[in-house]
Amino acid sequence: MSSYILKRLLLMVPTLFFVVLLEFLILNAVPGSPAQTQLGSQGTQSAQSQGTSESYQIFKEQFNLDKPVLYNTRFWISRERVANQLTILADGRRPTCPKGDEPAPDNCLPADEQPESGALINAQQSLSDWGTYVVSELLTIADNHDRRDVRILAIEQLTTNAKGELIRKRGEQLTATEEQYNDRVDTINERIEPWKVSPDASEAEIQITLSKWKVWYDKHRYRFMYPTERRISAFVMDTRFTRYMGNLLHLDFGISHVSKEPVIETLGEKVRYTLAMSFAAIFLAFSISVPIGVWSANNQNTWIDQVTTTVLLMLYSLPSFFVAVLLLKFFAAGDPINLFPVGGFVGDDAAQMTTLTYLKSVAWHLILPVFCLTYRRFAALSRYARTGVIDVIRSDYIRTARAKGLSEPMVIIKHATRNGMIPILTLLGTRLPRLIGGSIVIEVVFGIPGMGTYLLDSILARDYNALMAILLISAVLTMIGILISDITYALVDPRISFD
């Protein structure tokens, strides 16, 4: 048994890796992103303004949204591609030619040739994301391009792409060496920040600024050169997935895009609500449905068995959200009974409650939601228990036990029930992830701020880090639940062995 458990635990490592990879790719393949939402909601002009561009860049770097998802080939970006993106931005700044006989301003562009706002946002985002990989191309374009406005934009973009990346740690103090490194990077970044030219600058001014960039580039050329070994490293390591996996090794699920707080702290606050509700629901469901299933198997095909089956199937057919609304209407809203609280996890005066009063308030608030999570499980679990026990009752060793003179309760409880619990144990293992995932519908209806509500809010807000954390925890619990089910198989049925 121990060797089997060890093998299963070792197998969880590659399984979890591929689960993380699949979930990460799916979430990043969804159209749009938090960064695009933040930038796009402020309009095209804001996208190109200095303040918004800087805050947008910081936002992306904080959540690694400026990195490629799985593999990095940005060191192969051509000069023509960079020039095309700069041309789109330059055309977006050109005035629109008026219709009719009105005098046209210099360098105007017809309305039907103006780039769309989406193209402008994508161009700005691409140039920012490419970072230091295109600094050499930007400098060459600023020196040689045939359009003056494109050259000016290339110089402006250099002040963003040529900046060094600071060391940032969440929840940890920087070492003295790291602090010194950040100070040096800050000094360099502050130095190159003013090296821009205005749209109406003269050619002499452009050349003066460009000469500063050339001198500076020659001094820091090593940062922007990518020989074979650096390309191999960047191809794998400088990606969003690699950085996320590095954080996971330290149990760091990242920062929420919405609350800007560590996801692990928010999960710790939410999980207690869901665990209290889910543990109670699972315990009641199994402790009630299993005896019903065993009793029904022992009395199969009787009118009592048929009535029990009918009642349980009727309960199973009632949607939980429908029953939840009815319970609130008739037992919490005062029509006709005002017995239970309308929602929430505990009373409003929780801070002043004693421990016993607090537990009573929590139990009173959870009666209705726990009932809604429990009643639909009665039918399924009791039918599984009934079927499992019926199959065992027909076995030869049960007939042998009866032939030896054992009482019927002893035969059913000690022999038939124990070996007929394998289907139930299978279901018990799959119920572990629900301790974390909770029930979205029930938590929303009853206003319980648990994991289900947090999952729904994260989906609506595209909070990728929170979604990944919830899905990963559910995956781990699923694997642990399946392992527990396999182990309990051998405990309840001596015929099963993993040696």
Image: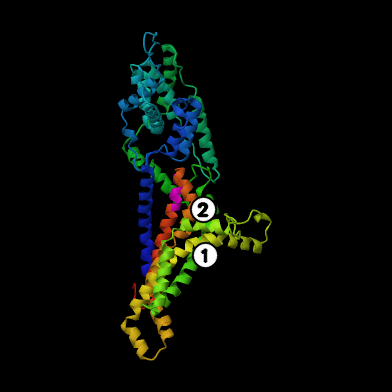
Secondary structure of residue under mark 2: helix
Q: Residue 445 bears which disc, if any?
A: 2
Q: CA distance from mark 1 to mark 2?
A: 18 Å
Q: Residues within 10 Å of mark 1 (few under 14, many from 20)?
A: some
Q: Quadrant of residue 315?
A: bottom left
**Amino acid carrying mark 1 in the image:** Ala
Rendering coords of residue 376 (x, y %): 44, 63
The answer to whether 421 is drawn above or below residue 166 in the figure is: below
Rendering coords of residue 197 (x, y %): 45, 18
Q: Quadrant of the C terminus?
A: bottom left
Magenta-tinted stretch: 463-470
**Amino acid carrying mark 2 in the image:** Val
Closest to the observer, 217 or 119: 119
Evaluate if marks 1 and 2 touch, with contact meaning CB atoms under 8 Å apart: no
The answer to whether 235 is drawn above or below residue 83 in the figure is: below
Q: Earlier in the sequence, mark 1 or mark 2?
A: 1
Rendering coords of residue 464 (x, y %): 44, 45
Residue denoted by label 1? 280
Rendering coords of residue 384 (x, y %): 38, 70
In the image, residue 372 lies in the stretch drawn in magenta = no
The answer to whether 201 is drawn above or below residue 222 in the figure is: above
Q: Residue at x 41, y 82 (%)?
A: 412
Q: Residues within 10 Å of mark 2 (few under 14, many from 20)?
A: some
Q: Quadrant of residue 492?
A: bottom left
Check the image and name the residue furthest to the front: 336
Q: Quadrant of the N terminus?
A: bottom left
Closest to the observer, 464 or 227: 464
**Can see residue 11?**
yes
How many discs appear? 2
